[in-house]
Image (cartoon, helix red, strand yellow):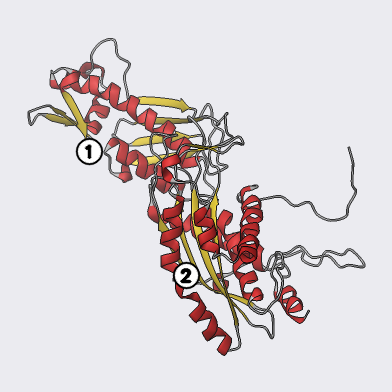
Amino acid sequence: MTGVFTHTSPTAPYRGAGRPEASYAVERVIDVAARQLGIDRAELRRRNMIPASAMPYKTGLVFTYDSGEFETNLRRVTEMAGWSGFEQRRAAARRAGKLRGIGIASVIEIAGGPPGIPMPEHAQIRFAGDGSVSVMLGIHSQGQGHETSFRQLVAELLGLPPGRVRVHFGDTDQVFHGVGTLGSRSISVGGAALTRAAEKIIDKARLLAAHMLETSAQDLEFAEGRFTVAGTDRSITLVEVARASLVPARMPRGIDLGLDEGATVSPAGPTFPNGCHVCEVEIDPETGVTRVVGYWVVDDVGRVVNPMIVKGQLHGGIAQGLGQALIETVAYDNESGQLLSGSFMDYTMPRADDLPFIETATNEVPTPSNPLGIKGAGEAGTVGSLPVVMNAVNDALASVGVGPIDMPATPERVWRALQM
């Protein structure tokens, strides 16, 4: 063992945890290979993509990809970005004294892992006497919009108005088990547990509804929050059953009162969100300042529960990756070792004016790993934005014969590269 003493601050990944770094290394190497081989960078990626017909695909390492249409992602995003017409835009920028570059990155990540031993999650659904629903989850929310997504999911599963559903997160007095929010697992694993709990609610409610309607449970059909006797207009809502379930006189003997069901689910395996990003940048050679002028992404996160929340997750992840690629750095004085970026007055963070309008699209390829077909979206934006931004920067520099630079492509670093 080797121990090292240092005065510098420890650092750790905070979004993506290994996947952005791996994608960065792979996608930078592919760009270098494409230049040496004289092959279009998008075309080189396309030639080496795993076809959808090969899914599930054993990689030869520890991963088996669940599903994906990688070539579709690439085709759609290059069309969105106008990849084939870029050289005309580059020429126009050069006439204006700017260096323009375009980058592409086709990435895949893992969510809801680790492989072989995915972690279980618990969900509980409890009806109150007024017909409202409380949902207890081991998952926690730190601003990802889980309240909306899980409320929407319960409303769809049980056919209820979303306003009837209250969601409670991470309360160990109410939830006996839960791993929590990490690794883009929340909606795929927590949603699977919630789906099973909802199925148990419907199964029990079916028995109670059959008693109330004086029919056989097998003759009842459930849809949009209502049990209907097949072939008739006789029906009763789930809310009516829930209210009656707490009145002993209305319930059959031998069945516990109330509708209160929980489920702990361990997923069949992790999921593999994937996507293709294209970024276009413009560099001012006089100052080294890089401006992102276009960003496009087609992402496959499986079934999309709430499109607005998925888009927000992608935007946030892209912003974080762009920050690391272009401006964020922990700086120390070379002589004294003094930290120079010890506050947000000195440590540059990406802001709204650092970003262009981000055009996103989804390619929904459901996963067989959970009953909802969801793959996870929390880290997908960052996984692709690190390599695609730097590929675009280095493409711009290569247009004037400057060799590749590494992150962060700060104005000083870009300017110095251009002076060599």
Residue found at the very far right of the displayed protein: 335
| Spot occupied by residue 192 in the image (x, y as percentages of width and height) | 42, 33
Residue 280: name its quadrant. bottom right
The quadrant of the rendering that contains the C terminus is: bottom right
The quadrant of the rendering that contains the N terminus is: top right
Residue for badge 2: 83
- Name which residue type carries label 2: Trp
> Which residue is located at x 44 percent, y 71 percent?
82
Classify 358 as above or below 88: above
**How many neighbours does mark 1 have within 10 angstroms: few (below 14), some (14-19), or many (20 or more)?**
few
Residue nearer the viewer, 383 or 135: 383
> Which residue is located at x 80 percent, y 54 percent?
9
Residue 258: name its quadrant. top left
Classify 152 as above or below 333: above
Label 2 secondary element: helix
Label 1 secondary element: loop
Marks 1 and 2, Cα distance to the nearest angstrom?
A: 45 Å
| Spot occupied by residue 31 in the image (x, y as percentages of width and height) | 62, 62
Of badges 1 and 2, the one in the foreground is 2
Q: Is residue 246 visible?
A: no
| Spot occupied by residue 169 in the image (x, y as percentages of width and height) | 50, 39
Residue for badge 1: 224
- Name which residue type carries label 1: Glu
